[in-house]
Image (cartoon, helix red, strand yellow):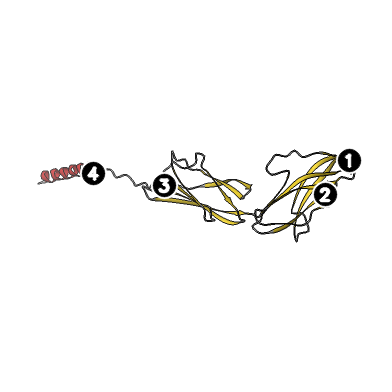
């Protein structure tokens, strides 16, 4: 009987080894992962508003992302697929009113039904564009003037404040105001561009010629542009 018991034990152990060898190895399940991310690359003024350029960091060739959805927070959206995504991952959007906006990038893998999103808050600040020279053509500003003779330089204003505003332009030479315009009322995105005339009374080299922009109701200049000039 003792021999039979030993034999049964050996047979049981051998059977367990066979069962263990026949059982398939189960690998742990790894869920498919995707990630959304982007930054603001550049902000610039345009004739219609404030342009933001965003760039995402997703490489379609090495990621599981199949489609992108941009929401700029003002009702405008852009959708990409792997075929329509810009090669450099950049997308631009123009905000034509100041305010706070939440920009959201959502990425998708449609086969696996996986999504991820990234949101960032931006603030489009009110801004008036104030410039010298004609807006449409490059300008070379004169640097030499003749004393007691009328001179002029083109000055421009574009109101991007989201509301109607009144402005004045003052011309200051060597610390003294030589002229100031009447009040100029501009609606949102409206432009004013005219020659600003002045007379330099004193000869001298390297004099500071300032163009100061005032908004109605404010004592100090809102924006200032200047040139260094010689008066002969």
Q: Disc 3 or 4, which lies upstream in sequence?
A: 4
Q: Disc 1 or 4, which lies upstream in sequence?
A: 4
102 on left or right of 21: right
Cα gap from disc 3 to disc 4, whole angstroms: 30 Å
10 Å neighbourhood of mark 3: few (<14), some, or many (≥20)? Answer: few
63 on left or right of 75: left
Cα gap from disc 2 to disc 4, whole angstroms: 91 Å
Cα gap from disc 1 to disc 4, whole angstroms: 98 Å
Residue receiving disc 1: 204
Determine the residue located farthest toward the bottom in the rendered image.
217
Marks 1 & 2, CB-CB < 8 Å contact:
no
Q: Disc 2 or 4, which lies upstream in sequence?
A: 4
Q: Disc 1 or 3, which lies upstream in sequence?
A: 3
Residue receiving disc 4: 23
Determine the residue located farthest toward the left in the rendered image.
1
Residue receiving disc 3: 33
Nearer to us: label 3 or label 4 = 3
Write the residue at 87% across / 45% down.
200
Helix, strand or loop at label 2? It is: strand
10 Å neighbourhood of mark 2: few (<14), some, or many (≥20)? Answer: some
Marks 3 & 4, CB-CB < 8 Å contact:
no
Cα gap from disc 1 to disc 2, whole angstroms: 15 Å
10 Å neighbourhood of mark 1: few (<14), some, or many (≥20)? Answer: some
Position of 211 relative to 217 (above/below): above
Nearer to us: label 1 or label 3 = 1
Q: x, y (%) of residue 80?
A: 46, 46
Q: Work out whether residue 172 can be spotted.
A: yes
Helix, strand or loop at label 4? It is: loop
Residue receiving disc 2: 172
| Nearest to the observer: residue 38 or residue 173 | 173
């Amino acid at each position: 009987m003792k021999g039979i018991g030993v034999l049964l034990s050996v047979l049981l152990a051998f059977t367990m080894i066979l069962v263990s060898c026949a059982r398939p190895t189960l690998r742990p399940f790894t869920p498919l992962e995707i990630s959304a991310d982007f930054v603001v690359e550049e902000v610039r003024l345009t004739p219609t508003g404030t342009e933001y350029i965003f760039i995402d960091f997703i490489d379609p060739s090495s990621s599981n992302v199949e489609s992108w959805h941009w929401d700029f927070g003002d009702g405008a959206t852009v959708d990409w697929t792997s075929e329509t995504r810009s090669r450099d991952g950049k997308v631009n959007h123009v905000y034509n009113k100041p305010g706070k906006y939440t920009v959201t990038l959502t990425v998708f893998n449609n086969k696996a039904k996986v999504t991820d999103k990234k949101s960032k808050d931006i603030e489009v600040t009110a801004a008036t564009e104030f410039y010298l020279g004609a807006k449409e053509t490059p300008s070379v500003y004169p640097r030499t003037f003749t004393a007691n003779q009328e001179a002029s330089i083109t000055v421009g204003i574009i109101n991007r404040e989201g509301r109607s505003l009144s402005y004045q332009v003052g011309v200051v030479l060597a610390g003294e105001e030589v002229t100031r315009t009447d009040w100029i009322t501009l609606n949102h995105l409206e432009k004013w561009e005219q020659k600003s005339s002045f007379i330099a009374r004193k000869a001298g080299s390297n004099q500071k010629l300032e163009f100061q922009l005032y908004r109605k109701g404010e004592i100090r200049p809102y924006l200032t542009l200047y040139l260094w000039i010689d008066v002969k």
